[in-house]
Amino acid sequence: MTPFQPVKKLAVYRRLVSGKEVRVGELAQNKRAVYFQYNSDYLANYHSLSPFKLDFSSGLTEAPATPHHGLHGVFADSLPDGWGLLLMDRVFRQQNISPQQITTMDRLAYIGDTGIGALSYRPITDWKTRDNSWIELATLGKHATQLFDGEADTVLAALANAGGSGGARPKALIYIDAQQNHKISTYPQAGLQTWLIKFTSQHLLLKHDEGLCEAAYLTMAKSAGIDVPEWKLFTPPASSGAKAWLAMKRFDCSYNKKDTGRYHTHSLCGLLDADFRQPSMDYEDLIKASQILCNSPAVGQQQFTRAIFNLFASNQDDHTKNWSFLMDDKGQWQPSPGYDITFSPAPSNQHMTTFAGYGSQPPKKAIQKLAQQANIPYWKDTQRIISQVLDALAQWNKVAKETGISKDITRLIAKQLDTVYQENKGLLDA
């Protein structure tokens, strides 16, 4: 293997919603741990990046050993998981560097300024080619699917640039010229819209209907009163076997005239140092943390509605990385639009986030407890939210047909939705 020296220090920058870039502080590591120190000018003029777990002071803050592999939660949010790590490790191997040699600081240096959210890290390593040329979306999707399916080994430079997002499915962060959607860039360029596109594979749970099903779920979630990102479907080449690729407009971008602004983005798992790979959180914790962070009791109802949707929609992959918050330049936080809202039953039939202690079929008393935490005063108001969610999910067959989902997948999901309804319909009782 090529001699390799891990990154020891990184300067952390934040791009504001206005587009201005400011230095936040420095990360440093030794044999013991990773440490962070805020810049004095940032302390004097801006706001805490992570109010619950990172001291907003001039002192050194040591990162906990777990659950973010020795990194502070707010910076761990800049790293991908699953698919993104697969791409990253392939690039390291192409440089004759073993992934076992790589630290989380090295991975931040690799991400540089191409990740989700407002934070960036310098110096940026040259392990990947920072290619800002145009590429056909069909080419990018085909290559991503081949890698995911194990039919390719080498990572295209464009795909390496685009792999800074989380989740296990093949996807890419792309930059689109609204006048020519088929050609995209995978590196930030002025004037381009920023999107996250998800590709499909025969090896996914819903195969090539995966993107269509998530689109249908986003439609129903919006009907239930849940804030969701702007999305659209791209038509892939027939040779790909895919029916459609779902793309969502990135909500961490401010879309000002130069398209350079960013909202600081923080996941629930990073905010509370929770392990998103484990059922480590309860919806009561989520609602309470949201109310405190956003300084708004009303925010609890938004999160409660989404929790009820996940329950009845059989979205049991509701782990702590699938909940995020956005901070503006004035330091005000708000929940991000809902994402990764889709049909995702678990083999154990248990939600990753529990309902007042229940992983499935929560009794009335559990939902009442969550509703009270969410500042929903009366049970009739809680039932109104439940009914609104059920009315939205009752559109499944209609929305599935309009979206182009296969009859087999439509029937499979309809059956599961009915099963979940039967298990939880007692919540409609007075």
Image: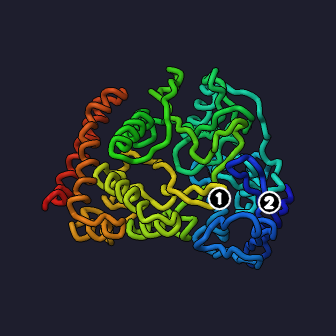
Furthest residue to the left? Answer: 430
Give the distance between the C-alpha atoms of the residues marked 1 and 2, in whole angstroms: 16 Å
Residue 82 visible, this angle: yes
Q: Percent x, y for residue 325?
A: 54, 57
Position of residue 406 in the picture relative to residue 317 (left or right):
left
Q: Percent position (x, y) of residue 181?
A: 61, 24
Give residue 23's mark.
2
Question: Which residue position holds label 1?
Answer: 330
Mark whose residue sits in front, 1 or 2:
1
Residue 150 in view in this figure? no
At 28% from the left and 52% from the top, the residue drawn is 312
Task: State yes or no: discs 1 and 2 in contact (Cβ < 8 Å).
Answer: no
User: For mark 2, does the 10 Å Cα neighbourhood hold few (<14), some (14 to 19), or many (20 or more) residues?
Assistant: some
Q: Amino acid at mark 1?
A: Lys
Which residue is rendered at x = 16% and y = 59% of the image? 426
Q: Which residue is rendered at x = 63% and y = 51% of the image?
A: 263
- Disc 2 marks a residue whose amino acid type is Arg
